[in-house]
Amino acid sequence: MTPMRDHDTAPHRPGRRLSTKETAELLGVKPETVYAYVSRGLLTSRREPGGRSSTFEAKEVEALARRNRREAAGSPGSGGDLSVRTRITLIEQDRYFYRGVDAVDLATRHSYEEVAEWLWTGRLSPGVTFSAPGPTVEVARRAVDALSEHASPVDRLRVAAIAAAAEDPLRFDLSEDAVLNTARVLIPTLVAALPPVRPGHKDGGPLAQRLWGRLTGHPADEASLRVLDTALALLADHDLAASTLAVRVAASARAHAYAAVSAGLGVLEGPLHGAASGLAHRMLLDVLDQGTAVPVIADELRAGRRVPGLGHRLYAGEDPRARVLFGLLEQLPRAESALLAARDIVATTARHTSLHANVDLALAVFTASSGMPATAGETIFAVARTAGWIAHALEEYGERPLRMRPSGHYVGPRPPRPLPE
């Protein structure tokens, strides 16, 4: 890649427009990245009459080059305050937005697959469904089936992603179209690789319906599938969560999309991230078993543990994702007792500290009332967030590579020291 040099940004004569090649050289990127900048609104292109290629305004290109240089010298790539320019998700005033559109509105009016396409391309594709080729699914299933029975859902998803990658010889093509094709195959492959709860389960229909049969043996009704599909869409992205940052670091090093998703899955398995809904699920079952939240919450506080399913550092008020899911769950008769238990948890904890229910508690109500295991929420979270991870990987592929390389602040003994005996 051509490095940016000071003389590359020398002023161009007024009115002069730059070719794609000149723009790429000025920015120190490949021509493909120039078009990625255009698609993300960072540059404006114009095709001259009678010309075949696009041209760019010199001043706009120079401004972007200066901004990239400031990033290289200061923030995120050299250990400064880690912040990442993104056009994917904005969280503010207890709301969140996917590419500027209210995420709750999108999730309640569109399917998970449609929301994923919006995150990736900024375009809606009504009726889109994701499917995977048989050979890829078969390879992923064989790899997952070889795991121990004690393997977690995230173990299975990570192995499925690796197996799918090994089956794709073109996985190192990081062009936008190639990564999008990978995404549309990878997500249904992850779902199909999970073992069905009931033998003989037939795949078909929307992704939520296929995932349902991997989470519970209960028959799928329309209202339950709507809750699951909405949950997937609501969880598709949430700015730079820890797993998403890991994905962007991998993409910054130009890891292919499967590897970037694997990085996200590795972080997601931590108890402070994806496993939170499982903790809320188990607590909810304890409350249902004892008939009241008081002794259960008391045990949590006595042990010095944070009560799962409550509060979120990005929302001072109510988690909008929880609000939507609780509203849908009220339409499921079988969820009534779990909903009452969740309200009891919130009310009991309010005597100690005022915290709102978060999406983990809403997921716990759904999974517990649907006959799903405690790990089901983590599975839903992982499948859902894969869409956001792909969106962030795509965005990162258009940036300067290896920009997320902070410098270590060494605090060990000063050298030179003698060799140890």
Image: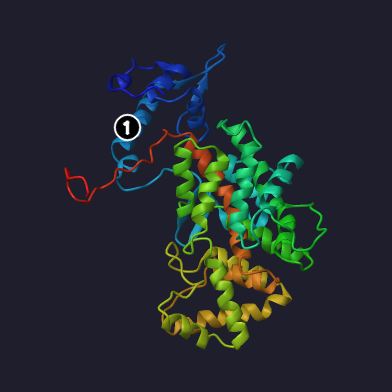
- Given residues 3 and 8, the one toward you in this image is 3
Q: Is residue 236 left or right of residue 33?
A: right
| Coordinates of residue 91 in the picture (x, y in percent) | 46, 55
- Which residue is labeled 1 in the image? 69
| Coordinates of residue 70 in the picture (x, y in percent) | 30, 35
Q: Is residue 407 above or below residue 60?
A: below
Q: Is residue 412 left or right of residue 29?
A: left
In which quarter of the view is residue 18 placed?
Answer: top left
Determine if residue 99 is in view: no
Q: Is residue 372 left or right of residue 298?
A: right
In which quarter of the view is residue 315 placed?
Answer: bottom left
| Coordinates of residue 301 in the picture (x, y in percent) | 43, 81
Which amino acid is tagged 1? Arg
Q: Is residue 299 above or below residue 108?
A: below
Determine if residue 368 is in view: yes
Pointer 1: residues within 10 angstroms few (<14), some, or many (20+)? Answer: some
Give the position of the N terminus as an image quadrant: top left
For image coordinates 65% across by 42% down, the residue present is 164
In this picture the colour scheme is: rainbow
Q: Is residue 260 left or right of residue 329?
A: left
| Coordinates of residue 123 in the picture (x, y in percent) | 62, 41
Q: Is residue 372 above or below residue 419?
A: below
- Given residues 80 and 200, the one toward you in this image is 200
The total number of labels drawn is: 1
